[in-house]
Image (cartoon, rainbow, N blue to C red):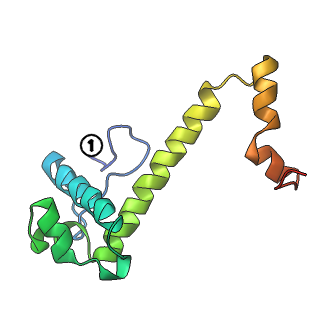
Amino acid sequence: MNESGASPGGDRPAPRASDGRVPGRRGLETRDRLTAVTMRLLRSVNYRDLKVTDIAREAGTSPATFYQYFGDVEAAVLALAEQLAERGNEQLNRLVRDTTWTGRRGTARRRRSPARSWASGRTTRR
């Protein structure tokens, strides 16, 4: 993280604590642990039944620490969704960048590409 609050990659701002501060390394680790626990709990608990105390206890911290990073459970879930979307976007970019799209294998990939089918208006095989 640099002085402007950007992450080391420099392309997106670092996450902020609920009071607007930019957390340091340990703070970011705590925030990541809280979002990881949130994801794990969402696999077995309905979103509406998820409580701050459950997340904090599973993360080995207090509810007060949770509230330093998130205003409520919804904010933690939204932060988790942003992380997952970013991760998916990075994977898609790698796929597009690192895949050979020429020659026999590239032609086969283009033929079965879901995006190609969608763009052509055919969403199902006939």
Disc 1 marks which residue? Answer: 1
Q: Closest to the observer: 47 or 84? A: 47
* Residue 90 % position (x, y): 50, 41
Q: Residues within 10 Å of mark 1 (few under 14, many from 20)?
A: some
Using residue 30 as the reference point, say whether residue 96 is left or right of it.
right
Q: Is residue 71 above or below residue 58?
A: below
Q: Where residue 45 appears, x then y in whole percent? A: 32, 73
* Image-based side of 96 in relation to 25, left or right: right
Residue at the image point whose x is 69% and y is 22% from the top: 100
Report the quarter where the N terminus lies: top left
Snapshot quadrant of residue 99: top right
Position of 59 with respect to 1 (left or right) is left
61 over 111 or under it: above or below = below
Q: x, y (%) of residue 39? A: 33, 61
Q: Residue at x 33, y 44 (%)?
A: 7
Q: Nearer the viewer, residue 14 or 100?
A: 100
Quadrant position of residue 79: bottom left
Label tally? 1
In the rendered view, tell whether residue 8 sits above or below residue 17: above
* Furthest-bottom residue in this view: 48
Q: Whole-percent x and y of residue 126?
A: 91, 52
Tell me the element at label 1. loop
Q: Which residue is found at the position 61% from the left and 29% from the top?
A: 97
Residue drawn at point x = 9 percent, y = 64 percent: 61
Task: Examine the rendering and report whether any part of residue 4 can be seen.
Answer: yes
Residue closest to the far right: 126
* Residue 22 in view here: no
Query: What is the three-letter code of the residue carrying label 1?
Result: Met
